[in-house]
């Protein structure tokens, strides 16, 4: 009787379990702690170094399997340039027209803004558009595009409302770029532009 009561007949995929638990814990750790005094540097270690170590020594796979490669660079560069051209005017009006966006991002303007956003986002993009997306893809197929966008969106809580509400769709689109190019690099480049340009506009760097 008791044997049947606790017989759940579960069959977990080890990699899915590892990716889900560890990525969730890493997001939480990032929220609560600042180890180096520089949040951007923390995020390189938390979101890139740790996942790559797990890929190599726990999952026994190559980082290339998770988009850590140039992939289809011709398509990647083309999509990146088109995205920047289309996104730039929208970002300009949002950053200038939404007081909460302007207030939040104007404080981040500095002489090293592009460097800061580069360091801050490269690990962030790898964990979502690399480790989680391609890890989920093996088990969930196309559904991985929406599934990986959920923690990405929740990771934006505390940012301006309009931005946060849009991230479930933005995460899907970033994921679509990684999916098409087999690389996290191109959504990273687009995200890097988005973050940098938003800060520059909000901080009135263009006069």
Image (spheres, rainbow, N blue to C red):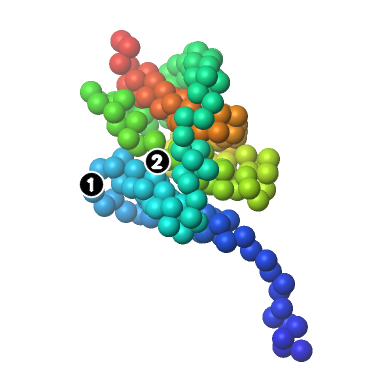
**Lower position in the chain sequence, tag 2 or tag 1:** 1
Task: Answer with the quarter of the image where residue 20 lies.
Answer: bottom right
- Give the crowd class for mark 2: few <14, some 14-19, many >=20 residues within 10 Å: many
Q: Return the residue nearer the eye: 5 or 126.
A: 126
Task: Answer with the quarter of the image where residue 141 lies.
Answer: top right
Q: Return the residue nearer the eye: 106 or 81.
A: 81
Q: Circle 2 is placed at which residue position?
A: 123
Q: Return the residue nearer the eye: 10 or 88.
A: 10
- The spot of residue 120 in percent (x, y) is 35, 37
Which residue is at the far bottom? 1
* Residue depicted at 46% across the width and 38% down the height: 68
- The spot of residue 111 in percent (x, y) is 23, 23
* Residue depicted at 32% across the width and 35% down the height: 119
Q: Is residue 198 visible?
A: no
* Quadrant holding the C terminus: top left
- The spot of residue 122 in percent (x, y) is 39, 36
Q: How many marks?
A: 2
Q: Is residue 169 left or right of residue 81?
A: right
Mark 2 element type: helix
* Residue depicted at 43% across the width and 18% down the height: 96
Q: Circle 1 is placed at which residue position?
A: 37
């Amino acid at each position: 009787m008791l044997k049947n009561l606790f017989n759940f007949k579960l069959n977990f995929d080890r990699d899915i379990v590892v990716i889900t638990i560890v990525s969730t814990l890493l997001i939480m750790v990032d929220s609560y702690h600042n180890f180096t005094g520089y949040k951007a540097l923390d995020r390189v270690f938390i979101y890139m170094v740790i996942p790559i170590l797990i890929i190599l020594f726990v999952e026994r796979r190559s980082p290339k399997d998770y988009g850590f490669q140039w992939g289809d660079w011709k398509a990647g560069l083309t999509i990146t340039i088109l995205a920047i051209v289309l996104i730039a005017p929208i970002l300009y009006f949002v950053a200038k027209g939404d007081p909460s966006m302007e207030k939040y991002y104007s404080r981040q303007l500095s002489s090293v803004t592009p460097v800061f956003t580069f360091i801050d986002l490269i690990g962030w993009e790898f964990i979502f558009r690399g480790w989680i997306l391609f890890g989920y893809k093996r088990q969930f197929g196309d559904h991985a595009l929406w599934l990986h966008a959920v923690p990405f969106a929740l990771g934006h809580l505390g940012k301006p409302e309009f931005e946060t509400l849009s991230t479930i769709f933005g995460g899907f689109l970033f994921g679509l770029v990684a999916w098409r190019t087999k690389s996290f690099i191109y959504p990273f480049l687009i995200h890097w532009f988005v973050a940098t340009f938003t800060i520059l506009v909000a901080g009135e760097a263009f006069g």
